[in-house]
Image: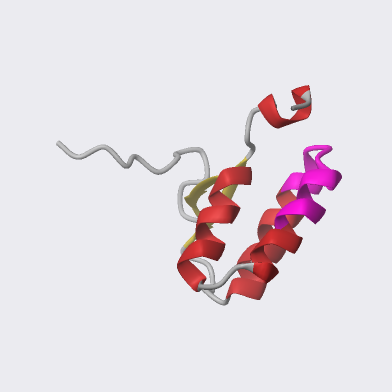
């Protein structure tokens, strides 16, 4: 695989946005493009629209960007319990 795959994922404020998948993928693609990752934006968009479910689509978006809150875009999601 190329070194581009190892590039750090940019933060993307999606929590609190309209949950329509077209809206979310648009925001994520815009974030990737702003961070010089246009190729990844196209790749992500293609994968999302070929996915079989909303949950799968969200998972794909999360592979490309760090999903953060609109209210606090500097703070990422903490998935740890406890």
Q: Is residue 57 visible?
A: yes
What residue is drawn where x is 72% and y is 49%? 31
| Residue occupying the far left of the picture | 82
Asked where in the image residue 79 lies, by quadrant, the reply is top left
On screen, 36 above or below 16? above
**Image quadrant for the C terminus?**
top left
Q: In this view, does 41 lie to the left or right of 21?
A: right
Q: Where is residue 32 in the image (x, y as percent from the top left)?
A: 74, 46
Question: Which colour assignment does the render follow?
Answer: secondary structure
Q: Does the magenta portion include 51?
A: no
Total numbered badges shown on the rendered structure: 0
The residue under the point 84% across, 37% down is 36
Residue 50 vertical placement versus 45 (above, below): below
Q: Quadrant of the rendered structure where residue 61 is?
A: bottom right
Instruction: Give the farthest residue toward the top.
Output: 3
Q: Is residue 65 visible?
A: no
Give the image location of residue 38, x and y in percent: 85, 46
Q: In which quarter of the image is the N terminus?
A: top right
Q: In this view, does 65 lie to the left or right of 30?
A: left
Residue nearer the viewer, 75 or 38: 38
Percent across and percent down for residue 49 are 69, 70
> Residue at horizontal 77%, vertical 28%?
4
Q: Residue 52: x and y, percent?
A: 55, 72
Could you tell me what secondary structure mostly forms the magenta stretch?
helix
Q: Give the range drawn in magenta.
A: 32-44
Using the rendered view, name the quadrant where residue 2 is placed: top right
Going 85% across and 45% down the picture, which residue do you hit?
39
């Amino acid at each position: 695989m190329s070194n581009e795959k190892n590039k750090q994922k940019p933060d993307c404020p999606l929590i609190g946005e309209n949950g329509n998948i077209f809206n979310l993928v648009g925001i994520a693609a815009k974030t990737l493009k702003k961070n010089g990752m246009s190729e990844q934006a196209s790749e992500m968009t293609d994968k999302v629209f070929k996915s079989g479910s909303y949950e799968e689509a969200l998972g794909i978006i999360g592979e490309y960007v760090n999903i953060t809150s609109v209210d606090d875009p500097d703070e990422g999601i903490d998935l740890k319990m406890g």
